[in-house]
Image: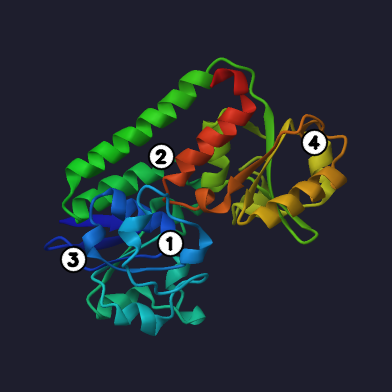
Amino acid sequence: MTVTNCGRELRFDSAPESVVGMMPSQTELLIRLGVADSLVGQAQTDTSALPEDIADQAEGVPVLSTDTPPAREDLLAAEPDLVVSPTEYEFTAEQGFASIEQLGDNGARAYVATGGCADRRNTAEVTDVLTDIANLGEILRVPGAADDLAQAGRDRLAAVQAAVRDRPRPSVAQVYVEVNSLGAIGAGVEADIIEQAGGENVFDPDAPEFADFFAAEINPEEIVSRNPDAIVFGVASPGQEERTRAYLRETFPDVPAVQDDLLIAVPQSDLYPGTLGNIDAVETIAGRLYPEAF
């Protein structure tokens, strides 16, 4: 069978038997598809924890890296025949990672999350993960498990849509804070998460600042002038969440999002392309925007 991924045709004569998940989000997908026994490596394991209900299935899987993509030698040493990744960045040779071409020379194919393809990153949607589930189900020859997993995802999204339908849409700013640097997210799967949750993004994905990248650095005045009802931000640790909340409260005391305590933290890992966490994020944000609907 052949699957087109990020403009490349991936041919599989048989189901891969040695698979690496390049992020916990991809490792989770593989486990939920029922191919835990095929895992020969997991990477970037410190970026997020696997859900409790499946974590034990990854306990014996070799850890190839903790907080960055694995080094070229470490990934190739695992001898995978399939590597599943959230973005193409994990294959940047200049960073010391194995390139897609190098993997191919060693008998491995790389599957990148649909929303993480370079030409799709700015227009990615939450439902792209359903495409990934279907593709991986075909590649790994587990179409039944893929159908069930995808249908569960569709049902969860439909439930949110039904709950928020015909309600006034609150305005939402999605930001990231690094020390004293403030950025806004206006495109990509992150922006679609806001849309699916029933929010109205105050940043326009068609604006020039988001033409080449889904995020842009902004001045605090950009938030003040847009006066959002809610502010969404990704977090990687409790400490980062507290620092970000403190910054937002201090910087935007008169913005409705702060006054109404609608500062919505979402695990950073739920914002990566190609993860079931995208659906978790939709549910989390919708629940805060429309508490009376859930």
Task: Say which element carries label 4.
Answer: helix
Residue 272 location (% of width, % of height): 50, 53
- Looking at the image, residue 69 lies above or below residue 176: below
User: According to the image, label 1 marks what residue?
Assistant: 23
Three-letter residue code for mark 3: Glu
Answer with mark 3 or mark 2, whichever residue precedes in sequence.
3
Q: Dot 1, how many residues are within 10 Å of its Cα: few (below 14), some (14-19), or many (20+)?
A: many
> What whole-number distance in Å separates the C-alpha atoms at marks 3 and 4?
50 Å
Q: What is the crowding at mark 4: few (fewer than 14 residues within 10 Å), some, or many (at least 20)?
A: many
Q: How far is mark 3 from mark 2, CA to CA?
A: 27 Å
Circle 3 sits on which residue?
17
The alpha-carbon separation of the residues under discs 4 and 1 comes to: 33 Å
Relative to residue 122, is residue 76 drawn left or right? left
Q: Position of residue 33 (x, y in %)?
A: 26, 49
User: Which amino acid type is marked by label 1?
Assistant: Met
Which residue occupies 45% across, 61% down? 87
Q: Name the residue under label 2.
A: 127
Mark 3 or mark 2, whichever is nearer to me? 3
Left or right of residue 269, residue 74 in this image = left
For this orientation, the residue located farthest to the top is 166
* Residue 106 visible: yes
Location of mark 4 (residue): 258
